[in-house]
Image: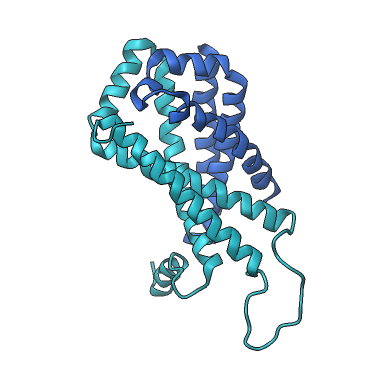
Amino acid sequence: MNKRFKSGLLTSLNPTRYNLERWSYTLHRITGVILALFLIAHIFEIYHVTLGIAGWNQTIAELSNLGVFELIGMWIIAGSALYHGANGLRLILNELFGLLLGKPRLPEYPYSPMSLGRNQKIVIYAITIIVVAIWIWAGLYLLAGLGIVRW
Amino acid sequence: MLLMYALGLIMIFVLTFHLLLVSPLTGKTFAEALSYNYVLHNLTYYQIIFGILLYAATIHGLNGFRIVLIEWLHLNKYQWVINSVIVVLMAILLAFGTYTLIVL
């Protein structure tokens, strides 16, 4: 693994030097990888239903042994699914149907990305607020399972 | 990419339905939503919806993972290794998932 390769890998994960769209791109990728890995585990987990009630209860008991880590994991996955879905819908509107992008214009100094107009910014901020609100709600629901919060 | 958009669009509806089934809106606690009878009922009663979700999620998820790996790792000569591993993994997951849905 050479130096250039390493720096490329880290730079691709670092949105801080870029604009809002880069943040959503990076988050979309990270949440996507989390969900893909979870999907593999989830399909094998659900397969245990075929082993009958004893097999299923044993699987759930083994997962419950993780205690608070199971809930943190579930919370991260819930947040990932919410963000990936909401941002994915924005990308479909954006890239597939060409909505929210504004009209094309000649580049003028100081240069700003044409794809990131007022509509895009509103939608990205709205997605963030809605996702965080539902994510907190989901967190309280998971905490209620531990008896920490009364649902 | 069109495949990813199409499957993503399908999943927005199907996955929302799946998440609603285990959400507080059903009036169940998290433990109740994971009980054997409830899971079995959902998987058999909504078999087709879960089937659509299984295929859409597996293809969308693993294809996305493949794209991320190829773009991150730059292993141009060995792309076929990643592609082959993903295809095999996809086949295994679909086999397990389909078996689960059919046998219940």
- Determine whether A70 is above or below A130 in the image: above
Q: Quadrant of residue B48?
A: top right
| Residue B25 point in image, percent of width and height | 47, 28
Q: Which chain is cyan?
A: A
Q: Is residue A77 left or right of residue A126?
A: left
**Front position in the image: A59 or A125:** A125
Q: Which chain is blue?
A: B
- Determine whether A117 is above or below B22 in the image: below
Q: Quadrant of the C terminus of chain A?
A: top left
Q: Is residue A68 left or right of residue A130?
A: left
Do we see residue A56 in this rendering?
A: yes
- Determine whether A125 is above or below A113 in the image: above
Kindly give the residue lying farthest to the front in the view shown: A150
Q: Residue at x 37, y 18 (%)?
A: B35
Q: Is residue A121 left or right of residue A50?
A: right
Count of labels in the image = 0
Do we see residue B82 in this rendering?
A: no
| Residue B24 point in image, percent of width and height | 43, 30
Q: Quadrant of the N terminus of chain A?
A: bottom left
Kindly give the residue lying farthest to the bottom in the view shown: A109
Q: Residue at x 44, y 36 (%)?
A: A40
Q: Residue at x 38, y 74 (%)?
A: A3
| Residue A145 point in image, percent of width and height | 30, 30
**Front position in the image: B34 or A131:** A131
| Residue A37 point in image, percent of width and height | 43, 42
Q: Residue at x 25, y 31 (%)?
A: A146
- Determine whether A29 is above or below A107 in the image: above
**Front position in the image: B81 or A80:** A80
- The colour style of the image is by chain
